Amino acid sequence: NNKDDAGSAGDKKVAVTIGAQDFGESAILAEIYKQGLAAEGFTTSIKTLGGFRDIELEAFKAKEINFAPEYAASMLEGLNNKKGEATGDVKETAKKLETYLTPLGLTALTASEAVDTNAFVVTKATADKYGLKTLSDLASKGKSLKIGAPADCATNPFCLPGLKATYGLDLSKNYTALESGQVADALGAASIDVGLLFSTAGAIAAKGYVLLEDDKNMLAADNVLPVVSTELGDNADLLKATNAITEKLTTDKLIDMNKAFDIDKEDAAVIAKGFLDDEGLI
């Protein structure tokens, strides 16, 4: 596709090639946008990247893709060499991201409510016992609780240091480093009381865990948002169709879709179609 292919603002002939990174949620989101945009008359396809953001950026540069479901804070920190510019405010973070995307011939579209970021979870039994709904609750009532998280938690600003700086909660002495795949099981086995998972992890739905609300916006705004070529970004019909899909995405819906993919082993295309049907988008 060369630059002239985009056509006028209302042209649906533009071909949309969506890059899917090598994890379930990216595959599901790529299918959601592919099928949703196809239902609006766009020619859509998915390119499976077989890797992560570095490969995605190369594919954008080579014009192999012109659309990718992304995450505001992670993409910003990926492009700025982890300068720490991402905050818990999605508008601020997306605005900052735009300054790094523009020189690459890319633009970010409207962000969704769905956030896939670090999340602190407890079992329902622990939540009920201590009256935990928020991280402020954890700070006031959960000082003695044991936390399990991946090894970078000790230095990650969105883990132990963040809990201490933002909530005044120091759990460093109660911390066990675990492989990320072990956290949900350790929580279930009660060898830890608080676990760090991704906020859209299927295990949260599968096991009925309680996601503690980050009531002071410590965690980075890793809201799902589409990143597209500036040519696509100038296409009014595409913007309208994409935003209609994006605004239906929520964290809870992603948790359910990830459970369907990771735990129930359903196909990403089938999961996406179910979501689009439920939301009246196809």
Image: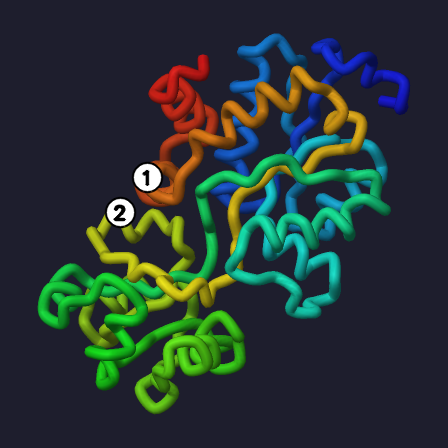
Q: Is residue 237 above or below residue 59?
A: above
Is 60 in front, or is 210? 210
- Tell me which corner region of the image, top left, top right, bottom left or bottom right, holds residue 39: top right
- The alpha-carbon separation of the residues under discs 2 and 1 comes to 6 Å
Disc 2 element: helix
**Residue 21 appears left or right of 142:** right
- Identify residue type, mark 1: Asp
In the displayed structure, would residue 171 be above or below residue 258?
below
Identity, as a three-letter code, of the amino acid under mark 2: Ala
Question: In the rendered image of this protein, does residue 75 appear above or below residue 259?
Answer: below
Q: Position of residue 119 (x, y in %)?
A: 38, 61
* Image quadrant containing the C terminus: top left
C-beta proximity under 8 Å, tags 2 and 1:
yes
In primary-sequence order, the first of circles 2 and 1 is 2
Nearer to the camera, 257 or 95: 95
Q: Position of residue 250 (x, y in %)?
A: 40, 39
Residue at position x 25%, y 84% in the image: 143
Q: Residue at x 70, y 22 (%)?
A: 16
Residue that appears at 70% across and 10% down:
12
> Where in the figure is residue 165, as x and y percent of width and height?
46, 81
Residue occupied by mark 1: 256
Identify the image quadrant of the N terminus. Answer: top right
Can you give x and y, in whole percent of width and height, for residue 64 in the image? 78, 32
Tell me if residue 56 comes above or below residue 275 in the rendering: below
| Residue at x 43%, y 76% (from the top left corner) | 166
Disc 2: which residue: 205
Q: Which mark is residue 216?
A: none
